[in-house]
Image (cartoon, rainbow, N blue to C red):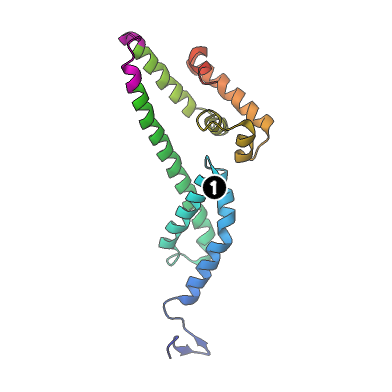
């Protein structure tokens, strides 16, 4: 028999074809919800869609060895890891860009070596202060200040009200001022 062997009244699948169809249906059923889930954890909708695609690709490696009952939990764990990887990559990429900006400022003739060292120290303090913000404040602050989103865009991205965005921004600025002082925090308002 070409499609499988008969055993007790049913056909045993060859090459796992029914399992493959089941996984394809699972992927189809999960995609929209996964993008929505990731949209709350990434900077942009495109990042969420990229993370969802990457998560599905990684899931292909594991779906045959994991029972179907665990696929959803496994997929969302993978998705969280992908979102974290994206975030770390973006931070690393921005850090490399900051180095090049710092190198340009090194060449600035109006800063003495002492002033340049102080400037670099303040930037390092500011970066560390941003890292220490509560996660929601940090996300709102970075979406607004780094990505240049409007209050309404940040609210939509985070699934919160514009008023809550304003509260998170105010809280972030207060904490940044406490950590690094008015001069540095004020330059990023």
At horizontal 35% and vertical 31% (from top left) the residue drawn is 96
Position of residue 85 relative to residue 55, above or below, is above
Position of residue 141 relative to residue 80, above or below, is above
Position of residue 186 relative to residue 148, above or below, is above
For the N terminus, the image quarter is: bottom left
Position of residue 21 relative to residue 70, above or below, is below
At horizontal 67% and vertical 32% (from top left) the residue drawn is 162
In which image quadrant can residue 134 be found? top right
In which image quadrant can residue 172 be found? top right
Image coordinates of residue 171 in percent, x first then y, are: 60, 24
Q: Is residue 113 magenta?
A: yes
Other residues around mark 1 within 10 Å, as few (<14) / some (14–19) / many (≥20): many
Q: Is residue 116 magenta?
A: no
Residue ID for mark 1: 38
Q: Nearer the viewer, residue 174 or 161?
A: 161
For the C terminus, the image quarter is: top right
At horizontal 61% and vertical 36% (from top left) the residue drawn is 153
Indicate left or right for 158 with 106 as reference. right
Q: How many marks?
A: 1
Image coordinates of residue 78 in percent, x first then y, are: 47, 52
Q: Nearer the viewer, residue 132 or 127?
A: 127
The boundaries of the magenta stretch are 103-115
Image coordinates of residue 155 in percent, x first then y, are: 63, 36
At horizontal 39% and vertical 35% (from top left) the residue drawn is 93
In which image quadrant can residue 154 be found? top right
Image coordinates of residue 129 in percent, x first then y, are: 47, 23
In terms of secondary structure, where does tag 1 sit?
helix
């Amino acid at each position: 028999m070409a499609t499988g062997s008969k055993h007790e009244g049913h056909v045993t699948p060859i090459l796992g074809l029914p399992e493959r169809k089941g996984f394809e249906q699972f992927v189809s059923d999960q995609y929209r919800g996964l993008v929505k889930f990731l949209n709350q954890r990434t900077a942009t909708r495109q990042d969420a869609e990229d993370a969802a695609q990457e998560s599905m690709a990684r899931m292909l490696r594991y779906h045959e060895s994991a029972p179907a009952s665990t696929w959803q939990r496994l997929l969302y764990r993978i998705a969280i890891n992908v979102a974290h990887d994206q975030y770390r990559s973006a931070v690393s990429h921005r850090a490399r860009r900051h180095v090049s900006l710092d190198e340009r400022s090194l060449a600035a003739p109006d800063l003495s070596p002492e002033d340049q060292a102080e400037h670099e120290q303040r930037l390092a303090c500011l970066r560390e202060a941003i890292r220490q913000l509560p996660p929601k404040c940090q996300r709102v602050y970075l979406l607004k200040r780094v990505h240049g989103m409007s209050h309404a865009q940040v609210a939509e991205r985070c699934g919160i009200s514009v008023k809550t965005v304003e509260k998170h921004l105010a809280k972030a600025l207060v904490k940044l001022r406490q950590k690094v002082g008015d001069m540095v925090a004020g330059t990023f308002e």
